[in-house]
Image (spheres, grey):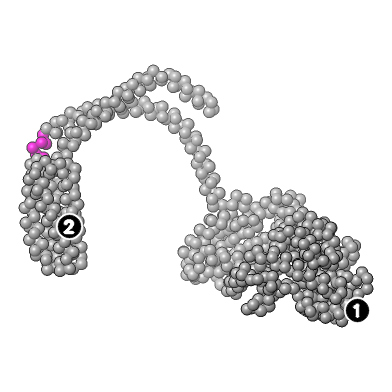
Amino acid sequence: MAGSFRDAAAWLLKQLRLPLMIVALLLGLAMAAIPVVIRALDDVVDKSLNHDIAWTGQNGRSELYDLARAVIAAEEDFNAEARMRIELALDIMFSRLDTWQAGVFGQFVNSSPQRKALLDRITAQFGEFERDIRNPDFERQLPELRRKILVLETAIDELASQAYDFYQHNKAGYSAELRFLQRVHNIITLSLIVISVLLILVLYWNNCSLEKSYGVQRLIAQENAYLATFDMLTGLSNRKSFMGALERAIFDLPPGHTIVVVAIDLDGFKPINDVLGHKAGDALLAEIGARLTRFSAAQRWAKSARFGGDEFMVMLVLEAEFPAIEALVQVLHETLREPLRIDDHFLTVDATMGLSLLREQSLAAEELVHRADLALTTGKMEGKARRTLFDEAMLSRTLNRGRLEIELNEANLEDEIEPVYQPIVDLPTRRIIGVEALVRWRHPIRGVVLPSDFIPAAESSGKITEIGRIMLEHACRDATRFPQPIAVSVNLSPVQLMRMDVAESVGRALARSGLAPDRLKLEITESVMLQDSRGTQALMRRLQAQGVTVSLDDFGTGYSSLSYLRSFPFNELKIDRAFLSEIGEDQQAAGIVQIILLLARELNMNVVAEGIEQEEQAATLMALGCARGQGYLFGRPMGFDEICQCLRQQTPPPMGAVA
């Protein structure tokens, strides 16, 4: 179709070639004649503008009368408004003087020395008026100013009268010349109209072609506008659109209503993405987006958005108290928890939610979203799969964390970071067969700061890598000075594994301290395996190639999976304290621990039970076959000298008893 259209257009152009050439010639002649006519018209118009001279002169007279009336009114009732009217009238007269000194009127004035002298006298008089107005005693000078205006009226009347006489003298000749040139101009204009009609036919064809191109451009512009405000994968609004809607909602918030911002983070999304692939992950996000869209559509005033990754945001404007708000957010939570099918897989995901509320226009949109994010972060730290409402204490913790980041950057960490050691014992004999190195920050002002207080700040500030290196080197040095050759365990956080070259750092620490590699254990958590499973596997094999033991810490509390135990070459499992609190009373808890022990035995892994605080717990663990334990029952974390004293008080261990 497009080809036939082009062929027809080409045939039409071929047929119209001669007429178009003639039209082009006529157009060229008309275009050549136009400048000549226009130049002649300009000359006559310039001359005919003498009527403007008369009009300009008469306006100057009227404006002087306005100034006189303003002065008379000020004499009767002088106030700020009257003074402003005088100043305005005077400004208008100064503008009129500028007009008289330029253009056609200026030529008219300069053509006569008498008129030029007259205008100079008028200008000088108005300069005196301006000085009079600036005088602080201006009110008393009003009568004198009125007298001067009356004197000046004669001069302006004379100038205006001369301008009018000049106009009347030349008007007839200019009018005849203008009429002739107008007829010539009309003929040329008519010719151009005819030629233009012919050109329009050609341009119409060109516009039809361009319209098709413009249609494509409009579609592209519409798509770009959509992309600027919506997320392509889920169809939800993006961050920019959401923040704009939230700002408008805050500005228009009706009395008695509450804005609820819900920050949502999907729990367990990364394992699905890693195991089933990005296609399945995208399908999951699209389904979550569809659920949020349906939920928002069911509300009177709501908006949902995807902020990136598996993070979503929902805004609700409700006329309700908190119990009703909480119930609605629970409905949202249950909506996201509903099972879904992706390809041949039935999946269930949970979500962690952070809520912030606004009942009056007291917060900016960014702050409201920030508070929801803080509540979300708090919920994730407390165990995920929960809904957490923002409170002011979260801001305090954030500020405290910021202060700790600053203090960590200023601290002499080599001197202030130190390890304390908690015993790991052989349960049947209660002998210390190893220790876990736990970090402490000996702050010069705060005193001893626990890791739960400063490790998050260290991770966010990047200081965790330096702290990890110091702890590793310090623990290795201390282990070489223990009275007995027991093992020392050092924790590695996920951030350390991402930011520092662990294998090289371990090699340097062992070489500098002279510690035997088989006496060093490195404890990592399950979350590390979710971030870079292949990289973590390679790192563990490099560490084990050096002779170092790798332990899976807090087993059973995170994303425990049998596939991880099969794929990752762990030497040891540490059962989390969460399973021990009711192990003596709850048969289910005891059964889980027994299964972990059997699994570890089959995989040739050692097991250490953490958090043992009661004799009954220790007895139950031994009955289940657990040989090693750690907890307050056997000793709290202690300094180097204290752990050395404990080791001296026990007889040397038999060969092969190192944990």
Q: Amino acid at mark 1?
A: Thr
**Residue 169 falls within the magenta-colored stretch:** yes
Q: Amino acid at mark 2?
A: Leu
Residue 111, given in percent of the width and then of the height, sits at 11, 41
Q: Which residues are magenta?
A: 167-172
Q: Is residue 19 left or right of residue 506?
A: left
Q: Residue at x 70, y 50 (%)?
A: 278
Residue 651 has which mark? 1
Residue 90 has which mark? 2
Indicate whether 448 appears above or below 238: below
Q: Residue at x 17, y 41 (%)?
A: 104
Separation of disc 2 and disc 1 at Cα? 111 Å
Q: Is residue 76 left or right of residue 451?
A: left
Q: Residue at x 53, y 63 (%)?
A: 366
Q: Nearer the viewer, mark 2 or mark 1?
A: 1
**Residue 55 falls within the magenta-colored stretch:** no
Q: Nearer the viewer, residue 624 or 509?
A: 509
